[in-house]
Image (cartoon, rainbow, N blue to C red):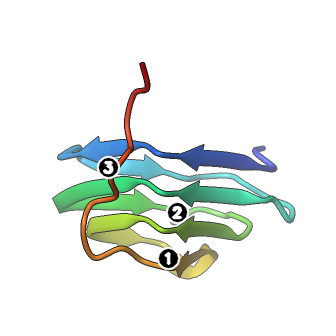
Amino acid sequence: MITSFDISYTNTRQNVYGFMLYGSSGLGPRTVAHSNIDNSPGIAYDASRQNGPITFDHCYVTGGVNGSNSVATTNAETMPVLGTGPRP
């Protein structure tokens, strides 16, 4: 069981699923921040199984979502987030 995670400054693009978030419990924190999940027309994230609260903060998200009851979105971005991806 995953009790906490911090996923930051990542890019996922044109995958069947951007994130599959299953089986987290407890209070966390569980955060995806400053990231681009560009999966249109696929699924941006699937949190359809039992999860504790998950926050997407300052993320650019395209595509569908499954099981969004456990997911809160704060400061949603309307354009891709700059400065994400691998670092030198």
**Amino acid beneath label 1:** Ser
Q: Name the residue that disc number 2 marks.
A: 47
**Amino acid beneath label 2:** Ala
In the rendering, at what x and y percent does residue 67 appear?
49, 73
Mark 3 element type: strand
Mark 2 element type: loop
Q: Classify mark 3: residues with Cα within 10 Å, few (<14), some (14-19) or many (20+).
A: many
- Image quarter of the N terminus: top right
**Marks 2 and 1, how far apart in space?**
6 Å
Q: Is residue 35 above or below residue 77?
A: above
What residue occupies the far right of the structure in this picture?
26
- Image quarter of the C terminus: top left
Q: Name the residue that disc number 1 marks.
A: 68
In the rendering, at what x and y percent does residue 56 appear?
53, 67
**Residue 17, label in figure:** 3
Tell me what residue is drawn at x 58 percent, y 46 percent.
7
